[in-house]
């Protein structure tokens, strides 16, 4: 059947549907289009050249108009095009017009500061699940704060696009926004008086290896167990896509089963036929899966920086119960490489990367695994330029891996941004261990970020321990003297090492006078099999 006859038969269908049915998908590029990150209500980054990109017919001329700028480019042989707008200044609302054979207009656009917020459940945790959602929602009238929520997508290869849309923050929309991201953006907006755009690319329970480019994992034997396990899954399920599909099917079946089970329980006959969890890694653990599906599609979009809250999943393995300590040590290498990977692929230099040190929690973690994740995060702060760490040891919940106080988390992240990215003269961190000096039977600890002075809240300093060369730690007395802390125990005559809050669930009371808590730390690098804590 030729195309003319087919057109007559399909008059009631729209043109795009016709092209799909005709199998001639290459003609879809006849109309210029852009990825979903471009839409009404979006925020463009000020102060840097802004990339605009999309698809059209090969060789087609594409015009982009924004404010007083008019840029032109030609789609390449693959139907892809890209151009740059010159640096923009804060303001709006504006209109962006893209034209070729057709014309697309995006309205209500602002120019301001764009931040990615990413990680696992504590970053994804929405405003609707706070302890006081109605109160927060009723006051959320911030039309110059916009957010884009990336739909969950785990992919075996880098994707060109992701699903999502831009929304203005208001009482009707804020409920689905990341609570940490909302409080972070609200602080920036109020202090800087500029539009804020927040791109929320998060997935609850996700592991760090899913948020990094695959070749990073392939290049280092330290991640061989991750790759070997994934290869075993591929052998069983034949493809990356099949693994993702198996979990989607399980989730669908489980939801249906749970509804039936709930009703059965009411009738006094609970069911025992729950669908079996697939015997493979979940989509949010698959190597590079979330990077391919939820980060790569964003990387031409100009941003100011990233806020990140993740690490809990790398302190334990949700599938086979493997050694959480091994996973945490592995994280010490992977997290800095993740930051480097994102920066390299965005091509915007060493943009700010501010993250949350995971909160205290008593269950699930293997012995010391969470403490090691925190140590890895602390060491990353020392090793990687233009990073910042919000400490949450005082606002966690040892009985809940999802502490509800997201306001202080977002505010503490904003302090790093306001100080380091926007030049405000404020105290933005609690005490961070710098170095130590041994004096007879005591160890003198020095700190950065002492602010107005060091303090212990409510009682004497707690959660300090001290050890000699035998590597046996004892609870230590700790006293503040000026900008130092003196640590000692009469049983340790010749001390060589100190640890502070180095456990999964410690809630210490060590702060600076500005109310920002100290980070846990250890001064030793001993193997855990050699020590008593």
Image: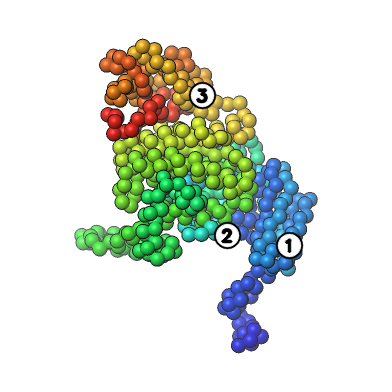
Residue bearing the label numbered 1 = 74
Residue drawn at the location 33% of the way across and 52% of the way down:
319
Q: Earlier in the sequence, mark 2 or mark 3?
A: 2
Is residue 421 left or right of 219 when viewed as pictured? right
Whether residue 227 appears in this view of the structure is yes
Residue bearing the label numbered 2 = 160
Whether residue 197 appears in this view of the structure is no
What mark, if any, has residue 467 been given in the picture?
none
Residue extending farthest top: 440
Q: Earlier in the sequence, mark 3 or mark 1?
A: 1
Q: Nearer the viewer, residue 244 or 333?
A: 333
Which quadrant holds the N terminus?
A: bottom right
Is residue 533 left or right of 219 when viewed as pictured? left
Label 2: how many Cα within 10 Å (few below 14, some 14–19, many 20+): some
x%, y% of residue 275? Answer: 30, 62
Q: Earlier in the sequence, mark 2 or mark 1?
A: 1
Is residue 213 left or right of 71 when viewed as pictured? left
Q: Residues under labels 2 and 3: Cα distance?
A: 43 Å
Label 1: how many Cα within 10 Å (few below 14, some 14–19, many 20+): some
Q: Nearer the viewer, mark 2 or mark 3?
A: 2
Q: Nearer the viewer, residue 96 or 490?
A: 490
Q: Are marks 2 and 1 in contact (CB under 8 Å)?
A: no
Q: Residues under labels 3 and 1: Cα distance?
A: 52 Å
Q: Is residue 457 above or below residue 148?
A: above
Residue drawn at the location 55% of the way across and 32% of the way down:
415
Q: Nearer the viewer, residue 137 or 243?
A: 243
x%, y% of residue 183? Answer: 52, 39
Residue drawn at the location 55% of the way across and 46% of the way down:
342
x%, y% of residue 405? Answer: 43, 37
Residue bearing the label numbered 3 = 449
């Amino acid at each position: 059947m030729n195309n003319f006859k087919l057109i007559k038969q399909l008059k009631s269908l729209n043109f795009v549907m016709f092209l799909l049915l005709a199998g001639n998908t290459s003609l879809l590029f006849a109309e210029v289009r852009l990825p979903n990150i471009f839409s009404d209500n979006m925020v463009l980054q000020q102060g840097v050249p802004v990339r605009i990109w999309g698809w059209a017919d090969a060789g087609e001329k594409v015009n982009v108009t924004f404010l007083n700028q008019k840029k032109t480019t030609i789609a390449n042989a693959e139907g892809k095009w890209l151009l740059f707008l010159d640096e923009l200044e804060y303001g709006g609302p504006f209109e962006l017009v893209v034209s070729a054979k057709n014309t697309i207009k995006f309205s209500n656009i602002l120019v301001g500061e764009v931040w990615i917020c990413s990680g696992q459940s504590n970053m994804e945790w929405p405003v609707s699940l706070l302890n006081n959602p109605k109160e927060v929602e009723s006051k959320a009238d911030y039309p110059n704060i916009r957010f884009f929520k990336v739909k969950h997508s785990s992919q075996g290869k880098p994707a060109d696009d992701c699903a999502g849309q831009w929304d203005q923050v208001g009482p009707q929309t804020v409920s689905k926004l990341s609570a940490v991201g909302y409080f972070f953006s609200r602080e920036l907006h109020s202090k800087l008086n500029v539009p804020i755009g927040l791109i929320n690319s998060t997935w609850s329970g996700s592991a760090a290896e899913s948020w990094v480019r695959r070749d990073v994992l392939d290049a280092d034997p330290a991640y061989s167990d991750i790759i070997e396990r994934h290869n075993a899954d591929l052998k069983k399920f034949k493809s990356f896509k099949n693994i993702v599909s198996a979990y989607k099917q399980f989730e669908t079946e489980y939801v249906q089963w749970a509804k039936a089970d709930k009703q059965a329980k009411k009738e006094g006959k609970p069911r025992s036929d729950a669908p079996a969890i697939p015997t493979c890694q979940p989509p949010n653990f698959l190597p590079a899966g979330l990077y391919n599906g939820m980060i790569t599609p964003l990387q031409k979009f100009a941003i100011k920086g990233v806020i990140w809250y993740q690490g809990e999943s790398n302190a334990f393995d949700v599938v086979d119960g493997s050694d959480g300590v091994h996973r945490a040590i592995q994280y010490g290498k992977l997290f800095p490489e993740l930051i480097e990977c994102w920066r390299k692929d965005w091509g915007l230099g060493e943009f700010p990367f501010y993250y949350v040190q995971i909160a205290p929690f008593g269950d699930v973690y293997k012995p010391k695994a969470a403490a090691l994740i925190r140590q890895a995060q602390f060491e990353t702060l020392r090793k990687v330029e233009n990073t910042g760490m919000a400490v949450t040891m005082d606002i966690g919940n040892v009985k809940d891996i999802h502490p509800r106080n997201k306001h202080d988390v977002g505010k503490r992240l904003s302090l790093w941004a306001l100080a380091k990215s926007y030049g405000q003269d404020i105290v933005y961190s609690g005490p961070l261990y710098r170095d130590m000096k041994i004096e007879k039977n005591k160890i003198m600890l020095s700190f950065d970020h002492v602010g107005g002075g060091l303090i212990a809240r409510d009682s004497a300093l707690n959660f300090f321990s001290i050890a000699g060369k035998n590597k046996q730690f004892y609870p230590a007395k700790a006293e503040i003297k000026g900008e130092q802390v003196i640590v000692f125990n009469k049983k340790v005559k010749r001390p060589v090492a100190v640890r502070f809050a180095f456990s999964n669930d410690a809630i210490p009371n060590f702060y600076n006078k500005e109310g920002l808590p100290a980070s846990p730390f250890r001064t030793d690098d001993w193997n855990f099999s050699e020590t008593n804590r």
